[in-house]
Amino acid sequence: MASLLPILDNRQPFQPVFQPCLHEMLQHLKVLFKGVLHSVYLSGSVARHEAIPGKSDLNLTLVLERPLTEQESSRLHSLCWHIARRHQAVTRIDVKQALRRDVLSLEGIFQWGIWLRHCCICISGQDLSDSFGDFEPSWDAAKSFNGPLEPILTEYRQKITRTRVMAHYLDYCEYIGKKMLWTGFTLVMHREKTLALSLKDATACFLKVYPEKSLDAERATMLANRIQVPKKATLFLMQHFGLWLADEWQRIERKIG
């Protein structure tokens, strides 16, 4: 019998320290985006009941009836920033956006079906995860979970090279460090037959198959943890470990398709 990916437990209440922030965010979303907002989903460490106060992000996915206007997008960005400042339990609020028609489209089965079904908990609106069955850990599932790395490397190499603002540099390093580690997990998900929901678990799965990459993974983890390193070191890691990941991704794609 084929193994299926696990589903997050939605029966337990979330950690009390994060509930005020979550409640306030939901209340504002419902008012500011009435008629546009279809449903809201929680992911990440707060959804897994593993969050650390003062160190964890609040990760939300908004399913929308239509794309947000420029003014609405600005309003959403401002809302996330202000609420994160008011609640010291979270470091920031990260929001993904998806259109309902895209989620329910044939093309969205892997991209959004896996995400909503296995990585999120619906906290407001109609739960679209019920539109999907449980997924198996396959290469197609892995690709939808974390797409190709090479375009991201090109984009962030330019951002890191150009920025002179330390806060921006650390933001870029955090993103690319996490992206490389999640890409590593993408390479092994279909072999390990599991779904890692934390960066720590994703890295451990990757290193079971590629133990020789432990030093690269350690350096990428430093970036993901916002530890300041020289730009040359970051760019070197992206050039060598990042491009190796991209090449390995393409090799598996050619082999499995």
Image (cartoon, rainbow, N blue to C red):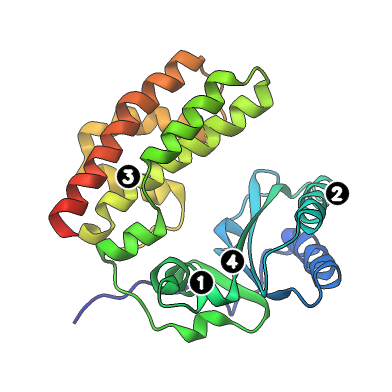
> In the image, which is nearer the foreground, mark 2 or mark 3?
3
**Circle 1 residue:** 116
Dot 2 or dot 1, earlier in sequence: 2
Disc 4 secondary structure class = strand
Disc 1 secondary structure class = helix
As drawn, 197 above or below 120: above
| Identity of the residue drawn at 60% across and 28% down | 170
**Separation of disc 2 and disc 1 at Cα?**
28 Å
| Identity of the residue drawn at 84% across and 66% down | 28
Query: Would you say 159 lies left or right of 220 here?
Result: right
Quarter occupied by the C terminus: bottom left
**Circle 4 residue:** 98
Question: Could you say which disc has been placed on residue 86 in the image?
Answer: 2
Q: Amino acid at mark 4?
A: Ala
Disc 2 secondary structure class = helix
| Identity of the residue drawn at 54% across and 24% down | 160
